Image (cartoon, helix red, strand yellow):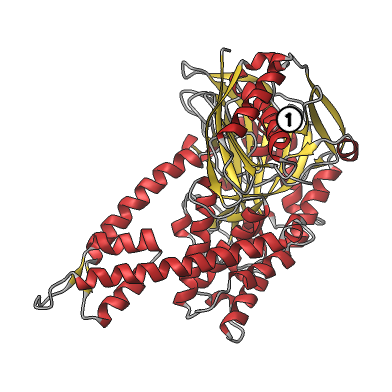
Amino acid sequence: MKAEEIRRRYIEFFKSKGHAEIRSASLIPENDPTCLFTTAGMHPLVPYLQGAKHPSGTRLTDYQKCVRTGDIDEVGDPVHLTFFEMLGNWSLGDYFKEEAIRFSFEFLTGENNLNLPLNMLGFTVFAGDEDCPFDDEAFQLWRSLGVAESRIAKLPKKDNWWGPAGVTGPCGPDTEMFYWTGPLPAPEKFDPEDKRWVEIWNDVFMQYNKNAEGKYEPLSQRNVDTGMGLERITAVLQGKKSCYETEIFAPIFAALDSVRGVDWVDPADRCASERIIADHLRASCFIIGDGITPGRTDQAYVLRRLIRRAVREGKKLGIEECFCAQVADAVITMFKEIYPELTERRDVILGALEKEEKQFASALEKGTKEFQKLIDRVPAHIARKVISGKNAFNLFETYGFPIELTVEMAKEQNFEVDMEGYEAAYKKHQEMSRAGAEQKFKGGLADASEQTARLHSATHLLQAALRKTLGDHVCQRGSNITAERLRFDFSHPEKVTPEQLKVVEDLVNDAIARDLEIVCEEMDLESARSRGAMGLFGDKYGERVKVYTMGDVSCEICGGPHAARTSELGKFRILKEESSSQGVRRIKAVIEGK
């Protein structure tokens, strides 16, 4: 079964169970400041998992584009991806374990669904501990559906528990579903340690709240959050060892082959460099499609790293000319029906890739000069000439020099490279990156305090003030809100002057002083557009949306949360204005006095 069919069957199945289909949200999170990217289907639903009313109801389903970069250095093996699609269904205080498990079982085994044999499936449930009891309800539900007890593993919190995202907050047990990928017949007993059992689906039951004392209390609104990776389930159903062997990546590899002038390659024989290029350029297309361009900070830096790593791998394959745009065009064509924003921003995507590739070529040229300086500093009479590991890593980190290129160039001039020192520097860099990633990409439910709600309202006033001061070309390109400050990225080609910033700040404070009511209305998307409501991310909404209006100042499609009146915001003060990436500026601001 192909990915397109799996995606369609999943959505149609849950629609038949009373779920409303919602559109994939942007890769740039609106409601979760702990993440640079949307890493799971639940991220856009944060306010609704916390009790806000969703315009489409209490039963939802979608396919959500996601990016995870915590393991970016692992991409290249047959398993890891940065960009992937997550199939999901949710109950927002509606049904709970029984319906969720029955839905999962029916979709997995139903004749008109995935039609998987029960004897190929294994399951896990939460074993219980001193804090929370064994999830006997989930266990008995699987048994009632005909699952043998030997195929249900009882595992601790580290395996079968979700959350809380921080020290406190919503959390609960989960149940996971596995498929046997080894030789037939499948073992009678399910052993979760056997990697031939591949996880294909996860149902999370948010039924507890962990309080400040570390105790788990029952939640008043119990939610179900599920996730099934499309690429993984496609590979499993097709009997492939890797998602890179499926039709999902075939057009991308074909474009890469065309650039290289090579004939057809067996999908199972694709090398690490080919997989890195395919994954990284696919991810780059979607990130640029959602308004990010390569730069030095946050999402822009991740994007730059993805593109430059793809280019480096291309050079390993012998590609000397620019190739990213040609490969990216295959990605855009492939997803044009599912994610039309890629087609709409095709020129922007291809242009950004071409520019970054050329800039990287310039960086490599500078790196070559730096390499030569290292060579020239070593006296000719020294018998054993060595480039230190620190210097080799600096060439990699600063100029994008692959270590293989440094070794090759060194060998040509009778130099060695201190590989042990390089590996130590690289490992230290990885540890620091991963530590940062654990903070930036930890995911989970964002802070929804009154302070963050006020700052969220301030971003609406800020965007309105920027458009009034700088022009209608200004639109949001991303935001990050914590309890202390807001950060707002917007499209603008040049630095905002201090005089302009003062006008913007005064306009926001004027709106605050007017004590405007912040009105939330639900309506269909067409009505919102006809009213002139701004959409933060174009057309990435469902048929019904929430529109927040602040007098005659601001009217935006948004999920919330917000203050009740502008006077609750206090005094607005801009701390800093700077570049985020090419054509995108960033403002950091606070509100004081509340």
Q: Name the one closer to the observer, 523 or 13.
A: 523
Tell whether 481 sits left or right of 526: left
Residue 311 in picture, x, y percent from top left? 50, 69
Which quadrant holds residue 328?
bottom right
| Residue 324 visible in the shown view | yes
Where is residue 188, by image quadrant? Answer: bottom right
Quadrant assignment for the C terminus: top right
Residue 395, compared with residue 190, is above or below; it is below
* Residue at the image position 53 percent from the left and 31 percent from the top: 165
Q: Which of 104 and 441 is in front in this view?
A: 441
Q: Please rate how many residues cluster around mark 1, counting C-alpha atoms within 10 Å: few if below 14, some from 14 to 19, many from 20.
A: many
Instruction: Locate residue 593, reporting x and y percent.
Output: 56, 12
Along the horizontal axis of the image, is 315 left or right of 1? left
Residue 282 image point, x, y percent: 62, 62
* Residue 163 in which image quadrant: top right
The structure residue drawn at horizontal position 47% and vertical position 53%, both measured from the top left corner, is 71
Residue under label 1: 92
Going by the numbered disc 1, the residue's amino acid type is: Leu
Q: In this view, does 471 lie to the left or right of 485?
A: right
Label 1 sits on a secondary structure element that is: strand
